[in-house]
Image (cartoon, rainbow, N blue to C red):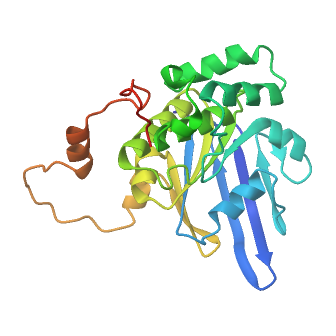
Amino acid sequence: MTTTTREPAIRVRAVTKSYQDLHVLRGVDFDVAPGSIFALLGSNGAGKTTLVRILSTLLRANTGTATVHGFDVASAPGDVRRSISLTGQFAAVDEVLTGRENLVLVAKLRHLRNPGAVADDMLARFSLTDAGNRRAGTYSGGMRRRLDIAMSLVGNPPVVFLDEPTTGLDPQARIEVWQTVKRLAKDGTTILLTTQYLDEAEQLADRIAILHQGVIIQNGTLAELKQLLPSAEVEYVAKQPTLEDVFLALVGDTADGAAMPAGGESR
């Protein structure tokens, strides 16, 4: 993951949003470096989704400014939309179509040349080639989410918004999505991730901003945020396996796209 002195991929300054007497955002400021993962951490109702909708031009702020990939979200919404992809809290795939057909459809909507080749490339990129000709409705939650992210990345947008990407997923599916997000950032994509899961932000983010009651109350690296609390007393104990270690040891680390028994469908 790269962080440089270039202009921020996302810049937010004094953004507010209210609905009559309900003040959802009360002056939000932050920058996101190109090619980094920025986690916006907060509880339900903190304003995370509202902010993402503003940055993706689906909603207008009351006051303040925001730029994405160098374009102002208010004055150049078309340029912003061409520079981003948005993946919401729930996978937006057509379950009647196959995985490949979903990708071909998106490629055609984006007016890309050779949509079949584009679809095949995305299936390979997201380890879905073996499942490409199966109906998306037979996919597990992790596979469906990977397909959803693949669809949003058709055309290689430089900035990606992931709004609560692992909501409702089982532990193994969450890990698969985390691996996908890390690969995207490694390839240079800028990612703004909203989550209410502390471990998700800890696993993925280069920087973490905590949004509370409509304002950013802290913004820093994981190490910087940990320094806000006093050091714990050190005790030397034998390392115990984590729940994740136990879970993966019991179920194995098999890919969702693996062949299934005849007549079986992954759920």
Q: Give the residue drawn at x 51%, y 50%.
A: 207
Vertical arrangement, residue 88 with respect to residue 216, above or below = above
What residue is rendered at 25% in x and 39% in y?
251
Say left or right for 205 vs 244.
Answer: right
Does residue 94 appear anywhere in the picture? yes
Q: Residue furthest right?
A: 75
Location of residue 83 in the rendering, given as x and y in whole percent from the top left corner: 77, 36
Front-most of residues 254 and 72: 254
User: Residue 246 placed where, x, y %?
Assistant: 20, 46
The x, y position of residue 21, in whole percent, is 77, 86
Q: Residue at x 10, y 60 (%)?
A: 235
Does the image show residue 35?
A: no
Image position, residue 77 (x, y; %): 87, 47
Q: Nearer the viewer, residue 36 or 261?
A: 261
Residue 257, quarter of the rendered image? top left
Q: Residue 40's image quarter?
A: bottom right
